[in-house]
Image (spheres, grey):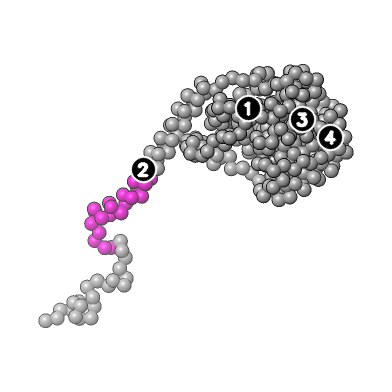
Amino acid sequence: MVTEGSPAHGQPLVDWRNLDPKDLPVKKSTRLALLLPPVAIVGVLAVTLATTATVNAVATRAEAAEITPYGERVPVGDRSMNVVINGDHAETIVLLPGLGTAAPGLDFAPLIDQLDDTYRVVAVEPFGTGLSDQTDEPRTAANIAREVHTALEYLGVDRYALMGHSISGIYALTYVEAYRDEVTAFVGIDSSVPDQPGGDEPIATDSLALLNTLGLTRALRALAPDPYEGLPYGANEREQMRLLTNANSAAPTVLDEMAHASTNVADASGRRFPADLPVLLFVREADDDVEGWVDLHRTQAASVDRGEVVLMAGEHYLHHTLSREIAQDTRRFLEVSR
C-alpha cells in the first residue's frame, strides 16, 4: 500500500533541489572539525606575532648596550647631534646621508678613507640617525638644513663643499639657499633631483612601523644576506651598522622623515642651485627605477655655470664600491673650483 507523501506517491521525502545546507543534520564533531583549522591558524599566527614582537623588544634593549660610541656629539637646540671628523686640512667637505641610512658616520667610512688625506671630512648624522638624538621637530628640508648648520656652526666649520647622497640632494637646495656664502660647491652621490618621477609619492610609514613593532622587520633582516658583506668595512663596523640599523631604521624620527619625503621633494619642484655654484654629480648610469634619471642630472648640471655629470656603473650607494673613483674626481673638480 502506498501512503500519501511517500516517494512512490510522486513527492520525495526531502526536496534536495531546494535544501539549504544549514538544514542538514551535521554532527557537532563535524562542525567542530570544520571550525578548528581557521581558529588554529589564527591562534598560531597570534602566538607567532606575539613572540616576534617580544623578541624584538628584548633584543632592541639588549643591543643598545652593545653599540660603541664614535664621533663627537655637539649641541643642537636642546638635543645632541653626532658628527664624525677625519683629516686635518685647510679645505673641508661635509657629508650628508641618504634617507634611511642608519649610521652615516660608519656608512661613509670607505669614502672618508679616500678623502681625509686631502680634506677635513665632516660626516654629519642628522637627528634620528647614527648616534644622534631623536627629535619631535618635523622632518622638513628647512628644519634639517637648519639643524645641520647649527652643528657645523658650533664646530666652527664655516666654509666647505657640501657632498650629499640621495635625498640630501633635495635638502642641499634649501641649505645652499640659506647659507650660500659658506658653501663652495655641491657634490651629489646619486643625489635626488627636483621633479624626479615618483619622488612625490608618499611612503607607507604606518605599515613600516607596524612591521617593526611586530618584530617582522628584524626577522626578515636576519634571514637576508648582510648588505655590507664583501664591501670595504671591518667586522666591527659591519656589526655596529647592524645594531644601529635595528635601532634606527623604523625609529620615530626616521619614519617622520619618510613621511615628509614626498612633500620635501614636491616643494623642491623647479628649484635650482645658484648659477655660480660649482656642481659635480656622480650618477648611477643604469637606474631602471626612475625614468630619465641620467637626463635629470644632466639638466641640473647644465643649470649652473660649472656643472659636471660623472656616470658610474654601480648601485645607488655608489660610495660603497666606488669611493676611490669618487674621491679622485672630487679632488680634480674642487681644485679647479678654488
The residue that disc 1 covers is 106
Instruction: Give the Cα distance between marks 2 and 1.
Output: 42 Å
Q: Residue at x 68, y 47 (%)?
A: 287
Q: Are marks 3 and 1 in contact (CB under 8 Å)?
A: no
Please identify, in this view, whether the residue under mark 2 or under mark 4 is nearer the observer: 4
Instruction: Give the Cα distance between marks 1 and 4.
Output: 27 Å
Instruction: Give the Cα distance between marks 2 and 3.
Output: 53 Å
Most common SS among magenta residues = helix
Instruction: Give the Cα distance between marks 3 and 1.
Output: 18 Å
Task: Report the quarter where the N terminus lies.
Answer: bottom left
Q: Are marks 4 and 3 in contact (CB under 8 Å)?
A: no
Q: How would you rate the neighbour count of disc 1 (Cα within 10 Å): few for under 14, some for 14-19, many for 20 or more?
A: many
Instruction: Give the Cα distance between marks 4 and 3.
Output: 11 Å
Q: Magenta residues, as a range? A: 23-44
Residue 43's disc number:
2
Task: Report the quarter where the C terminus lies.
Answer: top right
The residue that disc 3 covers is 162
Q: Are marks 2 and 1 in contact (CB under 8 Å)?
A: no
| Snapshot quadrant of residue 27 | bottom left
| Snapshot quadrant of residue 322 | top right
Dot 2 or dot 1: first in sequence order is 2
Residue 70 locus on image (x, y percent): 62, 20
